[in-house]
Amino acid sequence: MAALGEGWPARVPLLGARQWAVVAFIGVSSAVGYFWWLYALKHESPTRVTVFLSLNPVTAALLGAVLLGEALRPHLLLALALIAAGLWLATRVQRRPAPG
């Protein structure tokens, strides 16, 4: 609803091939991501699978550096290392059997 105030329906016909390619890429990559997310939820505990949501900023930072030439500054590299350490800690612990 908020986008209606910006006149987005009138802009759709103005989109070129490159813009539609971006829309298609986002749609396909989202579909693939959701497929693997649901697959992982079927085969692993939701708690363990949810930990990997922290990979979103890592992926964005690395793709930004590779595809857009964005700088990987020291504080960003530290943040990525902390996320990796958190993933390692969260996934290295063995699951305990349920009591009873």
Image: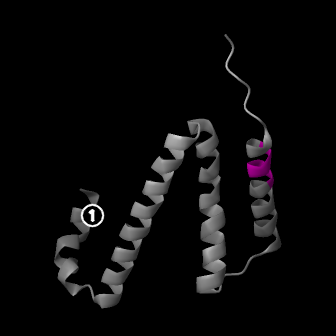
Q: Is residue 11 visible?
A: yes
Answer left or right for 5 relative to 73. Answer: left
The magenta segment: 85-89
Location of the C terminus (image quadrant)? top right
Q: Type of residue at label 1?
A: Ala
Nearer to us in this view, 74 or 96: 96
- Quarter of image, res 3: bottom left
The structure residue drawn at horizontal position 60% and vertical position 69%, both measured from the top left corner, is 60
The structure residue drawn at horizontal position 31% and vertical position 81%, both measured from the top left corner, is 20
| Outermost residue to the top | 100
Q: What secondary structure is the stretch in magenta mostly built from? A: helix
Mark 1 closeness class: few <14, some 14–19, many ≥20 residues within 10 Å: few
Residue identified by numbered label 1: 3
The structure residue drawn at horizontal position 79% and vertical position 68%, both measured from the top left corner, is 77
The structure residue drawn at horizontal position 49% and vertical position 55%, both measured from the top left corner, is 36
Numbered disc 1: secondary structure:
helix
Answer left or right for 14 relative to 66. Answer: left
Residue 88 forms part of the magenta stretch: yes
